Image (cartoon, rainbow, N blue to C red):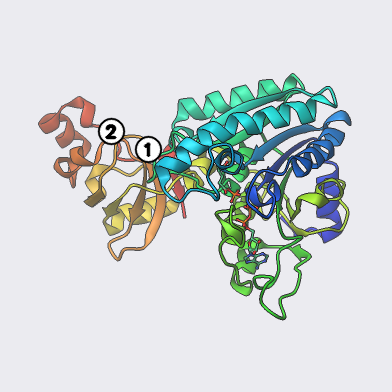
């Protein structure tokens, strides 16, 4: 695929039929950290324009914790996980009530979907989310998605919504991803650093990562900072989706293809969404180390990981969890979804299918990771 010009990428964003917009907590809050209804109303108005012109719009919105801590009597965002989860349970309803009113002014309905990283990697859940989103969009609804903070486990969670928004863009086959934050663009270094310059166009986000200094959140309420936004732009780019990153007040112009913020070109034609999901959705829970023969087969791209080629297993995971597949020298070869619990695997290591069937039973005569659930890294 040849690299498009900046103008071409911006035009493709303006022409997008389906668009995923992610807004961070920092764009929805006052300096105190509390939710700012005026900012939320302005965002809803910009998205409503696109919807009313026939666009299919999905909003991934953070802000549940920001919306909840004031009403609960806290001065700032709580630091411990249990209180954050309780605060999100209170704030999510308040956030949705605000969105309902704001979009209602334009006669637009909204629908809430809360997602945990854990349930998005299961095939059935993945298909359920996809089906529900497709139907909501067919009905003209603006789906509003957030991580299910109250239920997310500490070990497996998105934390920020940046990567989640890129996965959702892939899931709904969006033609554009818009990341709205509290800075107007990506800079060559954190904007507080003297000499940092705005980056207008990133033709290849993978190559660009080495030239840009990024840091975590600059605000009291955001979590991921630029690191997770670049990761989201990368996930979108490898799914064939262009991204524009800018501040929330630029949402309208960004979606119209105006020269605001930073635009990232797609680097690949559209790929399989389920495989991408496996590759990026959640942190692996463990590692299966393989011998040289299995490593070569996996690098070839068509092979399942069989127990015969596996040497060691590390970590504590259940069947269906994401795992690394590593070579003997510790290099990551692939990510995949394990076919067995970690404690079942040691007795299977090095055994071929006939041996597995004979010694352990027919239920063990299956790959440790099936090729449909394996993504090279
Ligand atoms: N190279 C960079 N260019 C722009 N912003 C950066 C860069 N590195 C770090 N940042 C910081 O990232 C912040 C945005 O991330 P974050 O606070 O997590 O926002 P959000 O709540 O929108 O997810 C900015 O306010 C900025 O301070
Ligand atoms: N899901 C959390 C998002 C946490 C957060 O701060 O995310 P972000 O502002 O996107 O970095 C919430 O709604 O509060």
Q: Residues within 10 Å of mark 1 (few under 14, many from 20)?
A: some
Give the position of the N terminus as an image quadrant: bottom right
Marks 1,2: beta carbons within 8 A: yes
Q: What residue is rendered at 22% in x and 26% in y?
A: 363
Helix, strand or loop under label 1: loop
Residue 280 or residue 311, whichever sits in front: 280
Q: Which residue is mark 1?
A: 370
Q: Residues within 10 Å of mark 2 (few under 14, many from 20)?
A: some
Instruction: Give ligand 1's quarter of the image.
Output: bottom right
* Res. 345 image quadrant: top left
The total number of labels drawn is 2
Q: Is residue 60 left or right of residue 293?
A: right
Q: Position of residue 183 (x, y in %)?
A: 72, 60
Label 2 lies in ligand 2 vicinity (Cβ under 8 Å): no
Q: Is residue 99 left or right of residue 163?
A: right
Q: What residue is rendered at 18% in x and 47% in y?
A: 350
Q: What residue is rendered at 45% in x and 45% in y?
A: 282
Q: Position of residue 51 (x, y in %)?
A: 82, 31
User: Which residue is at the far left?
Assistant: 359
Q: Position of residue 48 (x, y in %)?
A: 83, 33
| Inter-mark Cα distance, 1 to 2 | 8 Å
Helix, strand or loop under label 2: loop
Q: Is residue 107 left or right of residue 172?
A: right
Query: As displayed, is residue 90 above or below residue 306?
Result: above
Q: Which residue is mark 2?
A: 366
Residue 302 showing in the rendered view: no
Label 1 lies in ligand 2 vicinity (Cβ under 8 Å): no
Residue 23 showing in the rendered view: yes
Q: Position of residue 365 (x, y in %)?
A: 23, 32
Query: As displayed, is residue 321 above or below residue 195?
Result: above
């Amino acid at each position: 695929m040849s690299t498009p010009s900046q103008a071409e990428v911006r035009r493709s964003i303006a022409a997008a039929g389906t668009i995923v917009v992610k807004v961070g907590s920092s764009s929805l809050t006052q300096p105190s950290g509390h939710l700012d209804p005026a900012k939320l109303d302005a965002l809803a108005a910009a998205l409503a324009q696109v919807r009313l012109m026939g666009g299919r719009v999905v909003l991934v919105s953070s802000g549940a914790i920001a919306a909840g801590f004031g009403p609960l009597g806290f001065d700032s965002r709580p630091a411990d996980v249990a209180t954050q989860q309780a605060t999100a349970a209170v704030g999510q309803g308040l956030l949705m009530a605000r969105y309902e009113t704001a979009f209602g002014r334009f006669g637009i309905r909204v629908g809430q979907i809360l997602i945990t990283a854990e349930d998005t990697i299961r095939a059935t859940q993945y298909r359920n989310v996809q089906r529900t989103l497709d139907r909501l969009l067919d009905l003209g609804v603006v789906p509003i998605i957030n991580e299910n903070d109250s239920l997310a486990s500490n070990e497996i969670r998105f934390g920020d919504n940046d990567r989640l928004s890129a996965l959702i863009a892939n899931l709904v086959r969006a033609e554009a991803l818009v990341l709205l934050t509290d800075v107007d663009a990506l800079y060559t270094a954190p904007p507080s650093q003297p000499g940092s310059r705005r980056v207008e166009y990133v033709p290849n986000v993978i190559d660009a990562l080495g030239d840009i200094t990024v840091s975590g959140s600059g605000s009291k309420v955001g979590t991921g900072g630029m690191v997770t936004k670049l990761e989201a732009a990368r996930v979108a780019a490898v799914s064939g989706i262009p991204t524009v990153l800018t501040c929330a007040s630029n949402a309208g112009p960004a979606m119209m293809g105006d020269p605001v913020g930073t635009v990232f070109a797609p680097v690949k034609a559209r790929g399989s969404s389920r495989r991408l999901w496996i590759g990026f959705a959640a942190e692996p829970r463990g590692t299966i180390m393989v011998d040289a023969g299995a490593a070569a087969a996996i690098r070839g791209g068509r092979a399942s990981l069989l127990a015969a080629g596996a040497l060691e297993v590390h970590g504590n995971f259940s069947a269906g969890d994401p795992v690394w597949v590593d070579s003997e020298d510790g290099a990551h070869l692939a990510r995949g979804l394990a076919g067995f619990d970690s404690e079942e695997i040691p007795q299977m290591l090095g055994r071929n299918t006939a041996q597995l069937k004979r010694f352990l039973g027919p239920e063990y005569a299956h790959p440790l990771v099936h090729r449909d659930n394996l993504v090279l890294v």
